Amino acid sequence: MAFTVDLFWSFRSPYSYLAIPKTQKLVAEYDVTVNLRPVYPLAVRVPGFFKRADPRFAFYVVLDSRRVAEREGIPFRFPQPDPIVQNMATLEVAAEQPYIHRLTRLGAAAQQEGRALAFVGAIAPVLWNGSIKNWHEGDHLAKAASAAGFDIAAMDAAIAADPDRYEQIIAANEKDHAASGHWGVPTFVFEKEPFFGQDRIDLLLWRMEQKGLLRRAAPAATQA
């Protein structure tokens, strides 16, 4: 029996980044496909969200994401620059968003190929693992994409030629995300049941095992 999970995911979310290793491990060890579906962050998806949110919300996310990374042994630092252009004093989100639109459309292009999890697994660490400043400059993204088998220049060209096509993919993702039962990222959805957060992957696994999910067969040993 084939098991399929949708994963609604954002390039700005620290928890989305922190979910990648466990998600990759899940796919490697169990007979399940994870369809990663990029969405825009709340700052873009829900205008004025941060102005309405309790100011303690952002402080807690910073605190908690850092300790989760420390506990899991995942290299972590908030991206420099932030993928969202936002005045953190006024919380005003700029009308022009060059970084997040490009990233999310690239994710949609990879989704179209059925390889979005591999793409974000290569690209997200460039933003989040603390080894690179000014991730948006030079060939940082191109090198990471190439190592995972992607031609980012060709992807950028395809997006520039027909941006609406990729915006439609993102819009469909956001529609299904909204219908899933949760608004945050990362949200995993299995058989219409949402599991929100990188700390719910074990619960997701438990549910799928209830339904009969099996481990992948171990590769046959080779003889010398």
Image: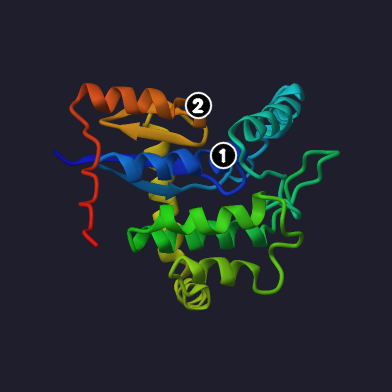
Q: x and y percent of residue 199 in the render?
A: 50, 26
Choose the circle earlier in sequence order: 1 or 2: 1
Who is closer to the viewer here, 63 or 48? 63
Q: x and y percent of residue 122 in the render?
A: 52, 58
Who is closer to the viewer here, 15 or 185? 15
Q: How many marks?
A: 2
Residue type beneath disc 1: Leu
Who is closer to the viewer here, 101 or 16? 16
Q: Which residue occupies 65% across, 33% down?
A: 49
- Give the residue pinned by disc 2: 199
Residue type beneath disc 2: Asp
Q: x and y percent of residue 134 in the render?
A: 75, 62
Indicate the colouring scheme. rainbow
Q: x and y percent of residue 169 in the render?
A: 39, 56
Q: Which residue occupies 34% across, 44% down?
A: 27
Q: Residues within 10 Å of mark 1 (few under 14, many from 20)?
A: many
Q: Residues within 10 Å of mark 2 (few under 14, many from 20)?
A: some
Mark-to-mark CA distance, 1 and 2? 9 Å
Which element is circle 2 on?
A: helix
Which element is circle 1 on?
A: helix
- Give the residue pinned by disc 1: 18
Label 1–label 2 contact, CB within 8 A: no
Who is closer to the viewer here, 98 or 223? 223
Decide: is 218 above or below 179.
below
Work out which residue is located at the far left of the displayed protein and give it: 1
Which part of the image, by quadrant, shows the N terminus? top left
Q: Which residue occupies 26% across, 28% down?
A: 208
Tell me where residue 90 sits by quadrant. top right
Residue 10: image tag: none
Which part of the image, by quadrant, shows the C terminus? bottom left
Work out which residue is located at the far right of the displayed protein and give it: 89
Tell me where residue 43 sits by quadrant. top right
